Image: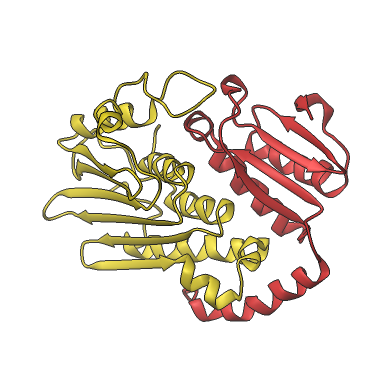
Chain colours: A yellow, B red
Amino acid sequence: MKELSLNILDIVENSIKSGAKNINLEIEEDNEKDFLIITVKDDGKGMDNEFVRIIFDPFTTTSTNKKVGLGLPLLRESAENCGGGIEIQSEKGKGTIVVVKFKHSHIDRPPMGDLASTILTIIATNPEINFLYVHKVNEKVFKLSTKEIREIVGDMAALRDVTILKWLGDYVRENIKTLYGGEENGKN
Amino acid sequence: MEKIKSIEELRKLREHARESLKVRSGEAKVKIMVSMGTVGIAAGARDTLMAIISELEKRQFHDAQIVERGSLGLDKEEPVVAVERDNKTIFYGKVTAEMARKIVAQHVINGQIVSEWVIAKE
């Protein structure tokens, strides 16, 4: 995948497939300390130690209609090539935490890309999930909670309305742009 | 300089959403499913979904529900979009953002299947 925002969507989709009702996405970027850390935490069905041990094997997948799973192995390779890595903690019946680290300034680090579209995709296709997105870039922070948004718009069905979705997409895009000091995405 | 959107604006939109939900009582007339497995995402499913939302919003069509479905195992056809309307489900393959806009206008809203892009029917 060319953008980290697509990897983030892939990880969150794994959380959704695991039956998670609460998903937290935290992105922390620090130019001075030179790191970019993506953390996805869910309360899905989790995995046992044996499955976690083989999860980076491309021939490991939970899919019933295919035999390979390339999302995590390729992301690990990308992170390790950029002075970082990936860690997965999981407990059966409790949930999973995926932490991906990159050296922020590494020349081969993929750009963040269209993160606003990733956030909107998660909300539009799973309005019933409590999704919390916290993004820190140096000293700036943007936070979005679908639980809070559902309280504002009244109910879950309203979160399926295209006018509300369009507004949310624009709202997230504007705030991410502000985090990056006016730049459209995290190419810095 | 354009004013940054505030979450307060969302409260105003709430009334709008209530009106459209009132018009649409019960199940949505159309269900749109986008496959969001790893291959679908890598093939551009996210942009396809964004085009669907944008086109529905542009045309102010509120009687559709966006539903996610995992990979169908049709990797070479990703991004796959399925439209459920009039008790029939039509699957479209290799759906770009531009194709998605046409599928919304022609099939989702007007009920005419875009036959040249159909890969399966249910």
Which of the 4 image quarters holds residue B80? Answer: top right
Residue B49 shown left or right of residue B20 in the figure: left
Residue farthest toward the left in the current orientation of the protein: A33
**Place of residue B49 in the rendered image (x, y in percent of width and height, measured from the top left):** 61, 45
**Place of residue A69 in the rendered image (x, y in percent of width and height, measured from the top left):** 41, 25
Tally of marks = 0
Q: Is residue A52 above or below residue A154?
A: above
**Place of residue A116 in the rendered image (x, y in percent of width and height, measured from the top left):** 46, 54
**Place of residue A53 in the rendered image (x, y in percent of width and height, measured from the top left):** 24, 29
Residue at x 76% of width, y 25% of height: B120
Which of the 4 image quarters holds residue A24? Answer: bottom left
Pick the quarter of the image with the N terminus of chain A: top left
Residue A150 or residue A103, whichever sits in front: A150
Residue A73 shown left or right of residue A132 in the figure: left
Residue B114 or residue A61, whichever sits in front: A61
Q: Is residue B35 above or below residue B17?
A: above
Residue B21 or residue B87, whichever sits in front: B87
Residue at x 17% of width, y 38% of height: A84
Residue A65 shown left or right of residue B117 in the figure: left
Residue at x 71% of width, y 45% of height: B32
Residue at x 24% of width, y 56% of height: A28
Q: Is residue B21 above or below residue B28?
A: below
Q: Is residue A155 above or below residue A28?
A: below
